[in-house]
Image (tube, rainbow, N blue to C red):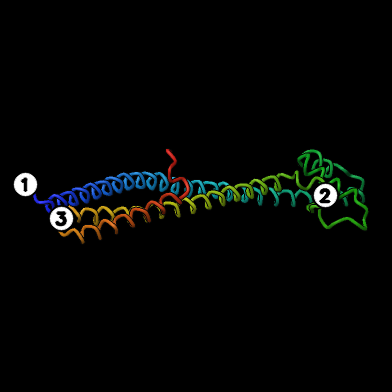
Amino acid sequence: MSDPSVERANSTQGALAITAAVLLGMAAVLTAWSAYRESLTSDLVLKSYSEQQATLALANDAYIRSGQERQQELTLFVDAALAGVSSSQDGNTVAYDYLTEGIMSEELYAAFAWWRDEPEETTPPTPFVPENPAFASLQSQVLLAEGQAYDEQAEASRVAAEAADANSDRFNLANVFFAVVLFIAGLTTIVQRRGIQIGLLVLSTVGLIVGFAVLATTPGAFALG
């Protein structure tokens, strides 16, 4: 006849072994999933930072071209203004007509005409003021707005990259807990004393719960792609 105490001990050992196996299996699956999400998130970090740098380059190019256009617009304005003064004195409008009709863009001429036709008491020093209805249509301002739009896109990419980087760190943190669970739960297959085994399984369970909580509260944790 078998000893009841031995049977109970064997039954307990079997239950502990099953519990350890379940914890090990869950930790292994969660580790693999968290590592997969971390890999995808790291790719997103690199992609977002690359997009930021590329967009900043486009913004800088737009600002450079805006500055060049602004200088050209200013030069044409000064030349046309001087030619206008000269033509009013000697009646020769050849230079003035050439500058305003032959060289100036439609947008620049509209801005210049507004400045020219303004009453003397309200005329600004140049036509390059926001009050000028044609000011926003100038090529320099169009390029400036383009550069500012690129800057906003670059900032959005930077924010996305930082958010993805933070999520990547959380996936790594979850993996730390799962690795600890794998180690501690694995010890229960070596240790023979039931009290120690139970303690190790409790620690493993706590670690698994904490790791899962970190994983579950990370944005995109359970997305497939």
Which residue position is annotated with label 1? 1
Q: Nearer the viewer, mark 1 or mark 3?
A: 1
Query: Could you say where residue 89 lies in the image, as x and y percent from the top left?
Result: 92, 51
Look at label 2 and name its amino acid. Answer: Asn
Image mark for residue 190: 3
Q: Classify 10 Å Cα crowding around label 3: few (below 14), some (14-19), many (20 and above).
A: few
- The image shows residue 208, relative to residue 139, as above or below, that is below
Res. 122 visible in picture: yes
Helix, strand, or loop for circle 3?
A: loop
Q: Nearer the viewer, residue 51 or 87?
A: 51
The residue shown at (81%, 55%) is 126
Look at label 3 and name its amino acid. Answer: Ile
Query: Could you say where residue 171 lies in the image, as x and y percent from the top left?
Result: 39, 51
Query: Could you say where residue 38 lies in the image, as x and y percent from the top left?
Result: 38, 48
Which image quarter is the C terminus in?
top left
Q: Residue furthest front?
A: 1
The residue shown at (76%, 48%) is 76
Distance Cα–Cα, label 1 vs label 3: 30 Å
Of the image marks 2 and 3, the number of the one nearer the N terminus: 2
Image mark for residue 23: none
Distance Cα–Cα, label 2 vs label 3: 84 Å
Helix, strand, or loop for circle 2?
A: loop
Of the image marks 1 and 3, the number of the one nearer the N terminus: 1
Q: Nearer the viewer, residue 65 or 9?
A: 9
The residue shown at (22%, 51%) is 16
Specify the quadrant of the image occupied by residue 203: bottom left
Distance Cα–Cα, label 1 vs label 2: 107 Å
Image mark for residue 132: 2
Q: Classify 10 Å Cα crowding around label 2: few (below 14), some (14-19), many (20 and above).
A: some
Q: Classify 10 Å Cα crowding around label 1: few (below 14), some (14-19), many (20 and above).
A: few
